[in-house]
Amino acid sequence: MAKTDAASPYRFLRPLRLHPLHHAKLWYFFTFLGWGSITPFLPLFFSRAFGLSPDEIGYVNCTRPLVAFVMSPLWGALVDHTGSHRVVLFAKNALQGIGFFSLKLIPRSFAVVWAYTVAQEMTCCANNALADSATGQMCRRFSRKVLKERRSPRERGRMGTSHDDVCPWGGTSYGAQRLWGAVAWGFVAAPLMGATLTYAPERVATWAPFACSLTSLWIAAVASLGMEFKKPGGLRGAGGKREREVRPIHWSPYDRVGVVNADP
C-alpha cells in the first residue's frame, strides 16, 4: 500500500494555528501570484531581451504544455507510489521560483531558452495537480456534511475543538480555495506587474517579474507544508476497495472553480 502524509509535522508552522484549508488558500494565492507576475510577460521578455523571433517564441510556448502533458502523469504516479506528496510539492515550488529567476541570467539564444523551458517543465510541472488533489481531499474531509455524519453533537462537545471539528473561514468547497488563485492572478499579479513594466524605472521593471515570482513561489512552498495529503479513509474506501482518484492537469486560473477541473 502506498504511503500518505499525515498532518503537518513542521513545528515552526504550529504557532500560526492555521487550518489546513487556509494553507491551501495561501498556496493558491502565492503560487498564482508568482505565475501571474511573469508568465503573461514571457513572450515580451523573449522578444525584447533575448531577441527571439515570433516563430521561435511560438516554439518555446508550445513546448511547455507538450512536456507537461507527458511528465504530469509520471510525477503523479511517482508521488502516489512513494507517498512523498508534501516533499515533492515543496521542492517543485521552490525550484520553480529559482527557475524563473534564473531565466534572467541564462545566455540569450533560442537553443538555450528552449532547453531551459524543457528542463524547467520536466522538473516543475504538476504542481497544480498535486495541490488540487490535496485540496479536494481536505475539502471532502472537512466538509460540513462529513463532520455532521462523523460525530454526534455530544461527542463533538466532549472531544473539544480541533481541525476536524472546526469549519474554516471561507467554507470547505473546492471553489472557495481555488478562488484565491484566480484573485491573485487576475486582480493582483497581472495588472500590478503590467503597470510596473509600463511606468516603473527600467532597472526596476527589468527585475520585478523575476524577483516577485521567486518570492511568491517560495512563500507558496512554505504554505504547502501545512496542507494535508491524506484521504478521509486512507487510500481505501468502504469495503477495503482501493479508491480511484482523478488528477487535474490543467493549470489555468480561468477555469470554473466549482468543481475540480479534471480534463477528460
Image: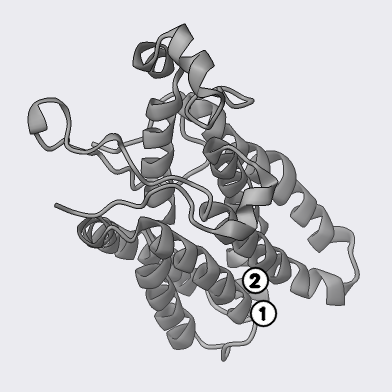
- Percent coordinates x, y for residue 18 in the rendering: 63, 41
Toward which corner of the image does residue 82 lie, by quadrant?
Answer: bottom left
Farthest front residue in view: 158
Q: Viewer-proximal residue, 88 or 65?
A: 88
| Crowd tier of the residue under label 1, counting other residues whose Cα lies within 10 Å: few below 14, some 14–19, many 20 or above | few
The amino acid type found where label 2 is placed reads Phe
Question: Residue at image x 35%, y 70%?
Answer: 122
Toward which corner of the image does residue 47 lie, by quadrant?
Answer: bottom right
Farthest top residue in view: 153
Quadrant containing the C terminus is top left
**Is residue 43 placed above or below 167 in the rendered structure?**
below
Question: Residue at image x 57%, y 88%?
Answer: 106
**Is residue 53 placed above or below 212 in the rendered structure?**
below
Position of 18 compared to 122: left or right?
A: right
Question: Residue at image x 51%, y 63%?
Answer: 93
The amino acid type found where label 1 is placed reads Ala
Instruction: Kindly state the secondary structure of the residue where label 2 is placed.
Output: helix
Instruction: Kindly state the secondary structure of the residue where label 1 is placed.
Output: loop
- Percent coordinates x, y for residue 262 in the rendering: 31, 37
Question: Residue at image x 9%, y 33%?
Answer: 240
Position of 130 compared to 246: left or right?
A: right
What distance separates the C-alpha of mark 2 from that of mark 1? 5 Å
Q: Viewer-proximal residue, 26 or 118?
A: 26
Q: Are marks 2 and 1 in contact (CB under 8 Å)?
A: yes
Q: Which residue is under mark 2?
A: 45
- Percent coordinates x, y for residue 37 in the rendering: 67, 57
**Is residue 245 placed above or below 203 in the rendered structure?**
above
Q: Is residue 41 visible?
A: no
Q: Viewer-proximal residue, 54 or 39?
A: 39
Q: Which residue is under mark 1?
A: 49
